[in-house]
Amino acid sequence: MSLLNFQQDRVTLQQQADVQDSSAGITRWGSPVTLATMIPASIQPASASRRILFAQANMFITHSIYLSADYGIKLNNRLIITDGNGNTQYFLVRGYYPLGGKKFGAGVTWNVDAEEQPQ
């Protein structure tokens, strides 16, 4: 059975929109730009080896998210994931790459390493 058959979660991809506040400072996520919605995905806790790899670069990840296509995701994009039960989680992208060109089912699987964030 293909990994892609388990893509029961849905992702909304947002790009950070920095805005200037009243004190002339920069506020992140003032008005995020939604780039795509209803992207099928599979979300899994990050493996210990992935966590260690990112920790060596002083970065923290909590989950690996698998996608079936390249959606042009960039570092620090926000992913809003809604599972089959209607629960919502927020993530910041820390890494994004194809899984060595390996095909699982219909196409190349892309991996997103992400850090869970409060809303």
Image (tube, grey):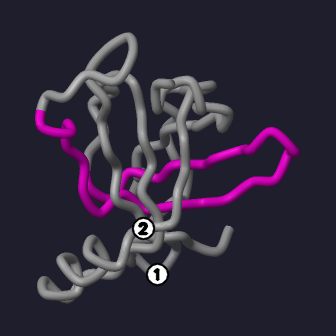
Left or right placement of residue 112 versus residue 30 in this view: left
Asked whether the beta carbons under mark 2 and mark 1 sit within 8 Å of each other, the answer is no
Q: Position of residue 1 (x, y in %)?
A: 50, 25
Which residue is at 59% across, 32% downward? 6
Q: Which residues are magenta?
A: 75-100
The label shown at residue 23 is: 1
24 or 105: nearer the viewer: 105
Left or right placement of residue 35 versus residue 76 in this view: right
Which residue is at 72% across, 44% downward? 82
Q: Secondary structure at mark 1?
A: loop
Callout in the foreground (2, 1):
2
Q: Residue furthest front?
A: 1
22 or 111: nearer the viewer: 111
Amino acid type, callout 1? Ser
Q: Position of residue 69 (x, y in %)?
A: 34, 22
Left or right placement of residue 28 versus residue 84 in this view: left
Q: Secondary structure at mark 2?
A: loop
Q: Position of residue 81 (x, y in %)?
A: 63, 47
Q: CA distance from mark 2 to mark 1?
A: 39 Å
Magenta part mainly helix, strand or loop?
A: strand
Amino acid type, callout 2? Ala
Residue on which disc 2 sits = 46
Please say if 91 is above or below 58. above
27 or 81: nearer the viewer: 81
Which label's residue is closer to the chain start, 2 or 1? 1
Q: Is residue 117 magenta?
A: no
Q: Quadrant of the C terminus?
A: bottom right
